[in-house]
Amino acid sequence: MTATARPAGPPHPAAEGDPLAGGADVWLLAEEDVPRFAAATGGLGLLTEEERARHDRLLFPAARARFLGARLLSRQVLSQYADVPPAQWRFEKGKFGRPTVQGADWGLDFNLTHTNGLIAAIVVRGRTAGVDAETTPARPEALRFAPKVFTPLEQEILRRDREDQQGHAFADSWVAKEAYTKATGMGMARGFDAFSVHRLRGGGLAVVDDEIPEPERPLWQIQVLQVWDRFALGIAIRASEDDTGPIPVRLRSAMAELLPRPAGDGAR
């Protein structure tokens, strides 16, 4: 393995001027744009030896593209919030496989998701977040898995949705639940039928999980966004104790905002 290069610098930037002080950023990259994104940002050269080996072991071109796109996106995105070159970021996995930043404590937390056609990364500071994406509406055969991933009440609500809306409802519930388990660090190790995600009267979502200590429950924020009319994007954020309201979520374009500007293409 490549020796770990630990990012240097102060542990936290001042809140003033910090783009993550008051919200979360979700960066989007279309799978079809990965070759151009890779060519412009360093490609496989930015990955560690271990990551390149994992990339090369993948059998299908689409899987290799998503793997490469996710790792390049995470590096480019994190470098927007800390004075660390993209090639120097190193990562480690938690008990259940969730990647975290290795090295200096920048207070950053990030999470990745990729599905057929979309790669997304969420970044927060001083908070914890998870993200998941799936094509919507879900295929009809996916609905057969509802008894394995939804609580009995969630299944009943799904059955009572209009038939033409069940595919969207299934995808929304799935990405919300997976984003939450990724934010907790457990991912698929946590049974999806062990907790519920429900719509609130005002249109938002709330997680009902007996394993969350009662004082912590108001800190959780769950939402599902529609992306490019084809994807349901689930976002889960555990706010800090200092937050006093909902955490704004900004959707950002990797291709439009992260690629190097051509020479002479200065701001007008």
Image (cartoon, rainbow, N blue to C red):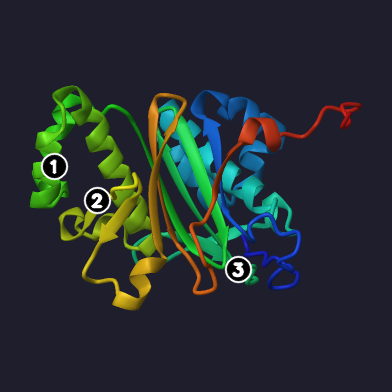
Residue toward you, 120 or 73: 120
Across and down, in percent, residue 119 comes to 48, 37
Q: Which residue in the protein does label 2 denote?
A: 198
Which circle's residue, 3 or 2, is located before the other in the chain? 3
Task: Determine the residue positioned at 75% across, 70% down.
Answer: 9
Q: CA distance from mark 2 to mark 1?
A: 9 Å
Across and down, in percent, residue 190 comes to 24, 60
Across and down, in percent, residue 141 comes to 14, 28
**227 versus 44 height, above or below:** above
**162 versus 70 height, above or below:** above
**Quadrant housing the C terminus:** top right
2 and 1 marks in contact (CB < 8 Å): yes
Residue type at mark 1?
Ile
- Left or right: 231 as drawn, with respect to 194: right
Q: Is residue 25 visible?
A: yes
The quarter of the picture where residue 11 lies is bottom right
Q: Secondary structure at mark 3?
A: loop
Q: Which mark is residue 157?
A: 1
Disc 1 packing (10 Å; few <14; some 14–19; many ≥20): few
Q: Is residue 1 visible?
A: no
